[in-house]
Image (spheres, rainbow, N blue to C red):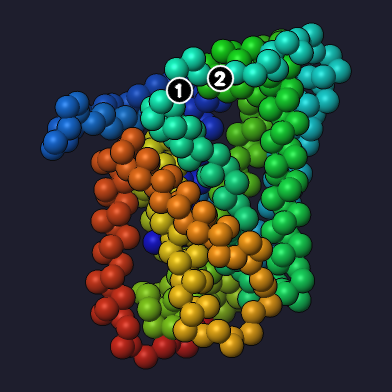
Amino acid sequence: MHSTVGESSSAASIAAGFARFSSFLIPAIGLPLFTWHLTVPFSGKPYDFIFTWAQPLAVVTIVLFTFINYLGVRLGGRVQIALTILKIGAVLAIVAAGFWLGRGDWSHFHPFWPEARSATTMTSFLAALAAAMWAYDGWEDLNRVGSEIQNPQKNIPVALIGGTLLVALLYLVFNAVCFYALPFAGVAGSSHVASDVVATFAGAGAAKWITLAMVLSALGTLNSSLLSGARVPYAMARDGLFFRVTGIVHQKFRTPSGALVFQGALACLMALTGTFEELTSLFVFAAWIFYALSVVAMFRLRKIAPDLPRPYRTWGYPVLPALFVAGAIALTLNIWIERPVRSTIGLAMILSGLLFYRAWANREPASPSE
């Protein structure tokens, strides 16, 4: 469930990317095809379901990248490398050109604090943090392909720590150029801040191409989620805990073809059911429930199996893990308060897995089909 929600939110990011790009080049794509006003029990306002051309375009993209990964891990990996280079290159180009050619103002960096701080301030902070947590969630994809990594005791920590630090550095320098070029209100009110930054020193024409580059680079998120996410239902099917079809290995391409098709179909379905913001919130809500449970499980294992070999040691145990669990609980509760409909649907989907697990728990593990 965790992986499929994550892939769906990646699909939604492509839909949102197309919608943002369409606002520059093809406005009709971003316009609503229809809107349903749905009555929500115990809510003071109706829920608006908005459908645009961006969502079916996202489905087409998911199908394309599922097919690429269906044809082989090497091909999917090469596509991922190319898209990652494009993404990092675009960010670095904006940063370098923004500071070199831009006519910004360093006074934009003055500290900003809300005039009245209250519980609402913390709620707003957690809501903003949810989006940031999705942006940094790529580290988790690596864990799904751990069995295919050489010397995992060394390479997994290096990749996790190094990758996270690299992403943090890129975000810091990108935010720096954004606040250099635009005042705080301009950054906060922008729906495509990279394009707005480029427009300040290169004009609207260049900003359109930057938007296109960002849309294409967002495909890297989709590709990595499809590539890594299929390993979860495949492994579960091998253990007899998921649909057997997801345990099929393609005879020629040696890829988990059944799992790829299954997750691609589910991602397409969910991409059609909501906007980028809605699906992102749903993913973060579901993901951080499992992250918290994983850390709780660590406390449990330390108690019932103290002699297990542990290649990795948790720094600051037990204080840091406890703080992590507390933060995850606060984040998920805030998302549920902000988006009760979507979060309740996600929670119901998670809990429904218990029924399937009970049905499959006593089933014999299946061998991969050729």
Callouts 2 and 1 close, C-beta under 8 Å: yes
Splitting the image into 4 quarters, where does residue 47 fall?
Answer: top left
Q: Residue at x 52, y 25 (%)?
A: 20
Indicate left or right for 211 with 359 as reference. right
Vertical position of residue 128 compared to residue 312: above or below? above
Structural crowding at the residue carrying mark 2, measured as other residues with C-alpha within 10 Å and reported as few (<14), some (14–19) or many (≥20): few
Q: Residue at x 63, y 47 (%)?
A: 220
| Of 219 and 134, the residue lying toward us | 134
Residue 340: in sight, yes or no? yes
The image shows residue 336 at horizontal and vertical percentages of 32, 43
SS at mark 2 in the image? loop
Q: Residue at x 36, y 49 (%)?
A: 269
Image quadrant occupied by the N terminus: bottom left
Indicate left or right for 212 with 340 as reference. right
Splitting the image into 4 quarters, where does residue 25 fall?
Answer: top right
The extreme front residue here reads 319
Indicate left or right for 50 with 281 as reference. left
What kind of residue is marked 1?
Arg
Vertical position of residue 230 compared to residue 106: above or below? below
SS at mark 1 in the image? loop
Label disc, if present, on residue 263 of the rendered structure? none
Return the residue at label 1: 117
Structural crowding at the residue carrying mark 1, measured as other residues with C-alpha within 10 Å and reported as few (<14), some (14–19) or many (≥20): few
Q: CA distance from mark 2 to mark 1?
A: 8 Å
What kind of residue is marked 2?
Trp
Residue 60: in sight, yes or no? no
Splitting the image into 4 quarters, where does residue 55 fall?
Answer: top left
| Of 162 and 244, the residue lying toward us | 162
Return the residue at label 2: 113
Vertical position of residue 256 compared to residue 224: above or below? below
